[in-house]
Image (cartoon, grey):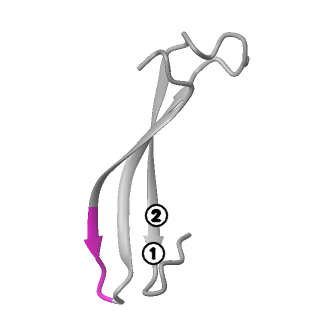
Amino acid sequence: MKLLPTSSDFLTGIQLKDNRIALAGRVFIPINKSAAKNINSPRHNIAFLVLIDKNGNFR
């Protein structure tokens, strides 16, 4: 994992009552913001949520 600058994974998805789809996952972001040092930097594991409507648009 330390060789990738960032990566993300969708872990689950569910259809909501209003027919939107909620996708939840995580993003691994380098702790060190310096471009020269972020390849070997440890990662933050940050949760994220994407909502998709019936047309495939997301927020």
Horizontally, residue 10 falls left or right of residue 52, namely: left
At x 72% / y 19%, what residue is drawn?
A: 35
- Looking at the magenta stretch, what is its main secondary structure? strand
Horizontally, residue 43 falls left or right of residue 39, namely: left
The picture places residue 29, in percent across and down from the top left corner, at 54, 30
Instruction: In the rendered structure, find residue 50 and report the number of the disc placed on it.
Output: 2
Q: Is mark 2 on a helix, strand or loop?
A: strand
Q: Mark 1 belongs to which amino acid? A: Ile
Residues tagged 2 and 1 counted as in contact (Cβ below 8 A): yes
At x 54% / y 77%, what residue is drawn?
A: 57
At x 45% / y 75%, what residue is drawn?
A: 52
At x 36% / y 89%, what residue is drawn?
A: 18
Q: Which residue, given by chain and number where applicable, does mark 1 sit on?
A: 52
Dot 1: few (<14), some (14–19), or many (≥20) neighbours within 10 Å? Answer: some
**Image quarter of residue 24:** bottom left
**How many discs appear?**
2
Q: Does the magenta stretch include residue 16?
A: yes
Q: Mark 2 belongs to which amino acid? A: Val
- Where does the magenta region start and end? 13-17
In the rendered image, the vertical position of residue 26 relative to residue 59, given as above or below? above
The picture places residue 5, in percent across and down from the top left corner, at 57, 25
